[in-house]
């Protein structure tokens, strides 16, 4: 063969081997979808962590790592009566033989099984630092020593009887049990917790006595109902004690395997030695299961330091070896009940524990109820005992066979010895000879061959005889237990009662049928004190103590750039703050919940407390000490919609939650919210200085869902700028604009203008300064005005420098210039409890006399905001203020009717009274009486529709003489002509006109 042929042949062989190698690789390539591969692999992983890591077995209540630790310690002979060994030695043995995972996870599992605050019955006893209920870590495994607890022998002692199946370990070098032969219901008495893939378990500890009693009940009566078991097992029994509130969660959990229970701490009040009735402290001596005590103490201390809760002077952790003690030292006049209720709801002094009783049963995770877990334990108990008795029976039979051989040998000892001497082939030959010559069994012959000669003595023979009788009795007993179910059940019951007697403990956790209320009256916790409340235009809230306020000047008050103080007042911490926004919403804040700020702090933005919409701003703030008042709230929008609401409608238990009080159209906004009562009239100012002034009873009371009534018919270019409620007496009011202009006037100079009439001019706007009215307030002692100067400092403007001016006069010049923010009128609104029944007749008469004196003498008296805005002046007779009469008035108003009669009659309209005062003829003394029940609700008695023209009275009241009316004057209207018409109108005898009119049936004058 040539050299080239050889090279080609070698090349072909190489190509063939490469092809075979490639084919081998191709054969090993898996052609599968990625989703299928992930499903398969994750399924395997999930099965592993469910069965071999996180979920306990329903039979012995152990996870694999716990089972391996206990089995390893059993093999290391670390019983309770043996010396301790280093935990590192145990962990190393577990890793090397059964559990090839990290040492930290094994040591943590070992430590948990020895912590008495996590288990009712710790399975391991440890010397050294094993952690604490404060979540302190245990000492390193090289420092601690461990051994089994005595009760652990009930889980392990039957291993020698071969009652459970064994499986190879991870390297097939040894065997380990797949379940321990537990004689106790470990899963129920110690509980379990774990998280796997798609499954989690949360089983609380229960009382051993109750669980064993329930098991005995099931043995005696396998058809025991859930209710019968429920009467025996009261509920969870946590090692840390505590109090369970309510039974519904327990019933649900026991019946379905899932449920929620409320677990509370136990506490006691500490009384003063000097005054046995005075509570000076609260001692918390039991906390809920699973709560970290150090964190709990820190949480309580944080609430005290942040002044979220008042009345606690100090929080001390006085816990020691004798038990837990968290001591709350109380301040003087503290409310102990309110304090503990608040802490229960805001800290882990009260928790909710969720049952989720998932366990491995029949090699699969299952959600099990109380009956299911008890049956699983009982089946395992029966299986272990049946196999154990069978094992003992076989052992007894073998021993009896041997003993019978020994007894037979004693009778023929000489012949046996002779046969042994003559036998060949050592031990095997002796055994065969004994079997052949004397008919011994192989077991007997083997035992005789190994028997020492001194055992053939008479004393030993007597002992064998006694042992034979004993073994026959044991065998008979085993046969009885295996063949007689009743006897077997009695055996199990006796076994359980022995365990109960040896290890049973009284219940630690109390169970109360009383449910827990989550409602906490935080007002009871608040310290009764006054402080200053501030809020800026942009919504920054501040709580300033009186001491801080008095020691600082307003010029140093911290404001955001171009912001201004919108409202401030001294309020009480027990009050509620009622806020209204321009979008028709409201919300309430408890005054004591507002955090205290420094004078130079920016404060807390209101949106961090209540979520406000974009463009939503606060238009009115009121301090409410009581919602029980006769005063009403009246609301008006820019488009002229209005409604009244009772303050009772705002008495809501929910705080810091925004709600609607007046639904608005998309292009409408709430102007303001004012206070009204039966004495008030409504003053409304619209674009261009035009006003309306009429009785506010036209506005009816509605619920929060109602949009109200269309109060004014406004042109497209007109809208309500501001409004106020006024008493038509010798009082004053002041308004301001967004350009720093002001106008103050006396209310008695304002003439009524009905809502259906044309508005009148209140002031002439400035031709050079375009402005808009931002606020109207009654003149009171407390009213003030603050703006922000060019240095961004709050500065007070003296309102006393504004002199009253008549109607129709132009608004003042710009009084505030070169500022960052023009500021606001600030009028404190404090709603107190007001009731007419609480005002005696003498006080009412005194108020009437006082108001009459002010009016007669034309006195300008500045009163408090409460007197001017909220309180009645009792200008009418007492019947007006009677509650039933007031309801009657409101009812008539809904029917567009109102009655007027008598001297300051009980149903006298304020508007009518004001008109009477301006139009009464002093020489006429006829009585004023109603002509008919059908009464017109409002009459514009000024008759001047605009400033440029006046209505002809005859056009209104003299329809029957319509043909005689003069033709309309076509001459141009001047100020002189208008004044003449007004003068002529004031000289008219309206009695004759009104009495003869068929269109307007109004009134006659009353006698003074």
Image (cartoon, rainbow, N blue to C red):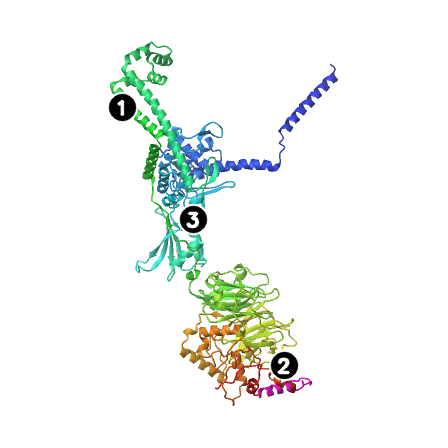
Percent of width and height locating residue 958: 61, 84
Q: Is residue 992 left or right of 116 when viewed as pictured? A: right
Q: Mark 3 points at which residue?
A: 249
Question: Picture quarter containing residue 479?
Answer: top left
Q: Is residue 628 left or right of residue 500?
A: right
In magenta, the rendered stretch is 964-987
**Residue 675 visible in the snapshot:** yes
Query: Is residue 295 depicted above or below 841 in this figure?
Result: above
Q: Which of marks 3 and 2 is in front?
A: 3
- Which residue sits at x=58%, y=37%? 38
Give the residue at mark 2. Answer: 947
Residue shown at 52%/41% (left/top)?
A: 198
Which SS class for mark 1? helix
Earlier-in-chain disc, 1 versus 2: 1
**Viewer-closest of 40 and 803:** 40
Q: Which residue lies furthest to the top in this view?
A: 422
- Look at the image and tell me in which quarter the N terminus lies: top right
Image: 408 above or below 331: above
Instruction: Give residue 203's position: percent from left, percent from top.
Output: 43, 43
Residue 862 part of the magenta-drawn span: no
Residue found at the very far bottom of the displayed protein = 923
Q: For the residues marked 1 and 3, what is the alpha-carbon distance in whole angstroms?
A: 59 Å
Q: Which of marks 1 and 3 is nearer the N terminus?
A: 3
Determine crowd level at label 3: few under 14, some 14-19, many 20+ residues with C-alpha closer than 10 A: many
Task: Please provide percent x and percent y for residue 843.
Answer: 41, 78
Q: What element carries label 3?
A: helix
Task: Out of 344 and 552, give the one closest to the viewer.
Answer: 344
Tell me how far mark 3 sits from mark 2, CA to CA: 76 Å
Q: What residue is disc 1 on?
A: 466
First of labels 3, 2 by sequence position: 3
């Amino acid at each position: 063969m040539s050299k080239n042929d050889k090279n080609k042949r070698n090349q072909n062989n190489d190509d063939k081997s490469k092809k075979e190698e490639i084919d081998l690789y191709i054969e090993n390539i898996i052609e599968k979808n990625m989703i299928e591969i992930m499903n398969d692999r994750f399924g395997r992983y999930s099965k592993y962590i469910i069965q071999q890591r996180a979920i306990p077995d329903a039979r012995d209540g152990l996870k694999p790592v716990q089972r391996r630790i206990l089995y390893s310690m059993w093999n290391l002979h670390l019983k309770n009566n043996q010396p301790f060994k280093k935990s590192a030695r145990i962990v190393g043995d577990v890793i090397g033989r059964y559990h090839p995972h990290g040492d930290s996870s094994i040591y943590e599992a070992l430590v948990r099984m020895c912590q008495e605050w996590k288990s009712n019955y710790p399975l391991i006893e440890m010397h050294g630092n094993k952690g604490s209920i404060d979540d302190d870590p245990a000492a390193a495994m090289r420092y601690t020593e461990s051994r089994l607890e005595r009760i652990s022998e009930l889980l392990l002692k039957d291993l020698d009887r071969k009652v459970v199946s064994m499986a190879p370990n991870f390297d097939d070098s040894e065997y380990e049990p797949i379940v321990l032969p537990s004689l106790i219901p470990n899963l129920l008495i110690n509980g379990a917790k774990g998280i796997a893939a798609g499954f989690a378990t949360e089983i609380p500890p229960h009382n051993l006595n109750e669980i064993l009693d329930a098991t005995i009940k099931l043995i005696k009566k396998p058809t025991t109902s859930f209710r019968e078991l429920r009467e025996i097992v009261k509920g969870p029994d946590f090692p840390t004690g505590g109090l369970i509130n309510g039974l519904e969660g327990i019933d649900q959990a026991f019946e379905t395997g899932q449920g929620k229970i409320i677990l509370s701490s136990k506490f006691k009040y500490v009384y003063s030695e000097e005054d046995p009735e005075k509570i000076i402290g609260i001692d918390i001596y039991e906390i809920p299961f699973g709560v970290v005590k150090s964190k709990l103490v820190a949480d309580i201390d944080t609430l005290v330091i942040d002044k979220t809760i008042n009345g606690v002077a100090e929080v001390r952790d006085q816990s020691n070896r004798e038990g837990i003690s968290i001591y709350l030292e109380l301040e003087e006049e503290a409310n102990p009940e309110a304090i503990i209720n608040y802490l229960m709801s805001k800290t882990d002094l009260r928790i909710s524990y969720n049952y989720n009783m998932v366990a491995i049963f029949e090699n699969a995770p299952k959600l099990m109820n109380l009956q299911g877990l008890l049956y699983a334990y009982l089946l395992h108990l029966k299986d272990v005992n049946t196999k154990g008795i069978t094992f003992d029976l076989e052992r007894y039979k073998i021993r009896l066979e041997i003993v019978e051989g020994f007894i037979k040998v004693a009778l023929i000892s000489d012949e046996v010895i002779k046969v042994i001497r003559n036998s060949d082939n050592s031990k095997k030959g002796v055994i065969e000879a004994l079997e052949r010559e004397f008919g011994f069994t192989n077991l007997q012959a083997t035992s005789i061959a190994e028997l020492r000669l001194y055992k053939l003595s008479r004393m030993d023979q007597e002992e064998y005889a006694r042992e034979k009788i004993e073994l026959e009795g044991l065998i008979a007993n085993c046969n009885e237990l295996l063949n007689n179910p009743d006897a077997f059940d009695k055996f199990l019951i006796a076994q359980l009662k022995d365990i109960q007697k040896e290890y049973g403990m009284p219940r630690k956790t109390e169970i109360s049928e009383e449910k827990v209320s989550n409602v906490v009256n935080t007002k009871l916790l608040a310290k009764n004190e006054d402080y200053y409340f501030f809020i800026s235009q942009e919504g920054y809230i501040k709580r300033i103590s009186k001491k801080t306020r008095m020691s600082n000047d307003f010029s140093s008050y911290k404001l955001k750039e171009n912001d201004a103080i919108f409202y401030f007042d001294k309020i009480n911490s027990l009050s509620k703050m009622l806020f209204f926004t321009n979008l028709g919403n409201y919300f309430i804040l408890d005054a004591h919940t507002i955090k205290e700020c420094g004078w130079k702090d920016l404060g807390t933005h209101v949106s961090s407390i209540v979520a406000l919409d974009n463009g939503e701003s606060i238009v009115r703030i009121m301090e409410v000490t009581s919602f029980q008042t006769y005063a009403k709230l009246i609301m008006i929008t820019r488009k002229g919609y209005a409604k009244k609401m009772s303050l009772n409608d705002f008495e809501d238990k929910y705080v810091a939650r925004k709600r609607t009080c007046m639904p608005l159209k998309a292009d409408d906004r709430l102007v303001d919210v004012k206070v009204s009562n039966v004495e008030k009239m409504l003053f409304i100012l619209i674009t261009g200085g035009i006003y309306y002034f009429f009785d506010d009873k036209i506005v009816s009371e509605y619920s929060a869902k109602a949009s109200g009534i269309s109060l004014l018919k406004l042109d497209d270019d007109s809208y309500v700028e501001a409004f106020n409620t006024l008493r038509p007496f010798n009082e004053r009011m002041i308004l301001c604009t967004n350009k720093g202009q002001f106008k103050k006037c006396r209310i008695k100079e304002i003439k009524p203008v009905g809502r259906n009439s044309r508005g009148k001019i209140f002031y002439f706007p400035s031709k050079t300064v375009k402005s808009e009215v931002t606020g109207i307030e009654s003149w009171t002692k407390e009213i003030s005005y603050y703006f922000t100067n060019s240095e961004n400092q709050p500065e007070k403007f003296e309102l006393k420098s504004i002199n009253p001016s008549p109607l129709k006069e132009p608004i003042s010049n710009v009084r505030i210039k070169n500022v960052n923010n023009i500021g606001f009128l600030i009028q404190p609104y404090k709603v107190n409890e007001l009731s007419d029944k609480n005002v005696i007749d003498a006080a009412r008469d005194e108020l009437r006399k006082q108001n009459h004196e002010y009016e007669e003498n034309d006195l300008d008296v500045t009163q408090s905001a409460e007197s001017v805005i909220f309180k009645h002046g009792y200008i009418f007779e007492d019947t007006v203020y009677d509650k039933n009469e007031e309801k009657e008035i409101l009812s008539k108003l809904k029917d567009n009717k109102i009655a007027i009669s008598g001297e300051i009659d009980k149903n006298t309209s304020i508007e009518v009274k004001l008109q009477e005062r301006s139009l009464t003829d002093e020489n006429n003394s006829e009585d004023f009486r109603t002509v008919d029940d059908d009464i017109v609700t409002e009459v514009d008695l000024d008759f001047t529709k605009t400033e440029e023209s006046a209505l002809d009275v005859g056009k209104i009241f003299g329809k029957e003489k319509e043909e005689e009316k003069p033709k309309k004057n076509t001459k141009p209207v001047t100020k002189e002509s208008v004044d003449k018409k007004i003068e002529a109108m004031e000289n008219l005898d309206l009695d004759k006109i009104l009495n003869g009119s068929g269109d307007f049936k109004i009134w006659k004058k009353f006698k003074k």
